[in-house]
Amino acid sequence: MTAPVITRLRQRCPRMRLTIQTTVDKTFLQSRYGNFDHVARIEDFGFRMISATGIDLEASARDYCGLVGRYDQAVADNVQLMAENRPDLVLSNVAFVPLAAAARLGIPSLAMSSLNWADMYRHYLGHRPEAGRVLETLTRAYEGAVAFLRCTPSQQMSLSNLRPIGPIAEIGTPRPQNLRQVFGPGDTRFGLVAFGGIDHDVSMEDWPSLPGWHWLTPQPPENGRPDMDHWTRAGMSFTDLVASVDVVVTKPGYGTFTEAAMVGTPVLFTERPDWPESPHLDNWLKAHTRALETSAASLLDGSLPDLLQRLFSLPAQQVASPDGVDHAVDMVLRTLCDSRQINVCS
């Protein structure tokens, strides 16, 4: 979600210097962001997960309680990191400790996401005795930003500084001929199976073999299969791959959903009724491409041919437009100009 905004910012401000604070692998980030300085340390963790969709609620509650207990020191440590290479603006998607550090340094900040961890915590853990203290800490950090740019689609949010913006996504270039050159003849159909991380419910070892289909995935079976390859063998970006395949099979997630909706690629996705974003993501996706929800078990029990037939029989929809990219860039530049009283891109 952040990468398209940074790309557009760099087009408008070629001299912009970028620092990314995250524990995400730098090599992966370079494929999306190009050159940047990397701070590979951050306190925020979202939720502790046991799979791509399974939350370890007890571990998450314990670690939020621990983070709030050492919060002043955590923010102070982030202040020190930030002060060493003082930025003109902090854009968070959607960590709260860096926002609090920016506030202590008097640096303007913006949050931007389709979710926030205060409302997520409230949904799953708001009943716990320590919840009031945790929620006060998270909410104060988010509301210390100039604005929270709430991307379309998104979960319901309770923050006081929300600024709704449009969808944010990269638009991929369809290159199906490249897939056929690498993997198969002209009548081969291609599916992208992408659940993100380790998923205990959808094992590619058990994925059904369908005549005429070739599957691309980040997690192919270790022993290999003639109808399955790692997606990087396609020799194209993930965004272009979304635009080139016949179907994407995934879980509810902002990036994959919006990229598919920008180009009209059909999406078969597993249900996630407990996740607060899900109904908003699901309904928005269905308004912009063929989309069908199912269970993880149904992908593996022989139902896949019927699911694909039902998916492809749905009516076509009007693809979406990434209006939120320019909305976010305009807000970033306006915030910089207001804080520095200059034309930041001159």
Image: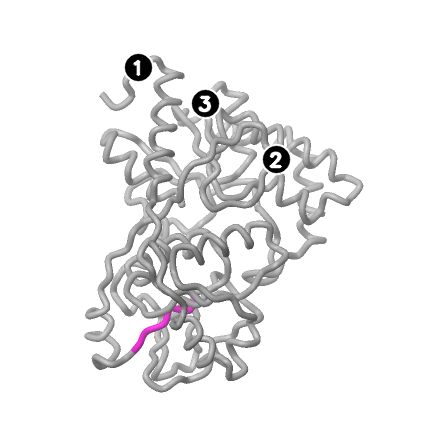
* Residue at (48% x, 55% y) in the render: 253
Residue 322, percent across and down?
Answer: 34, 44
- Determine whether, in the image, residue 112 is placed left or right of residue 67: left
- Is label 2 in a helix, a strand or a loop? loop
Discs 2/3, front: 2
Cα gap from disc 1 to disc 2, whole angstroms: 33 Å
Residue 54, percent across and down?
Answer: 61, 61
Residue 55, percent across and down?
Answer: 63, 57
Cα gap from disc 3 to disc 1, whole angstroms: 15 Å
* Residue at (46% x, 27% y) in the render: 109
Single out the residue that lies furthest toward the right: 129
Q: Which residues are magenta?
A: 189-193
Q: Residue flagged by tag 3: what amino acid is it?
A: Pro
User: Which residue in the structure is indicated by mark 1?
Assistant: 342
Is residue 298 found inside the magenta-colored segment of the image?
Answer: no
- Is label 1 in a helix, a strand or a loop? loop
Q: Earlier in the sequence, mark 3 or mark 1?
A: 3
- Determine whether, in the image, residue 26 is placed left or right of residue 120: left
What number is the disc on residue 108?
A: 3
Is residue 191 found inside the magenta-colored segment of the image?
Answer: yes
Single out the residue that lies furthest toward the front: 315
121 to 91, vertically: above or below: below
User: Which residue in the structure is indicated by mark 2?
Assistant: 158
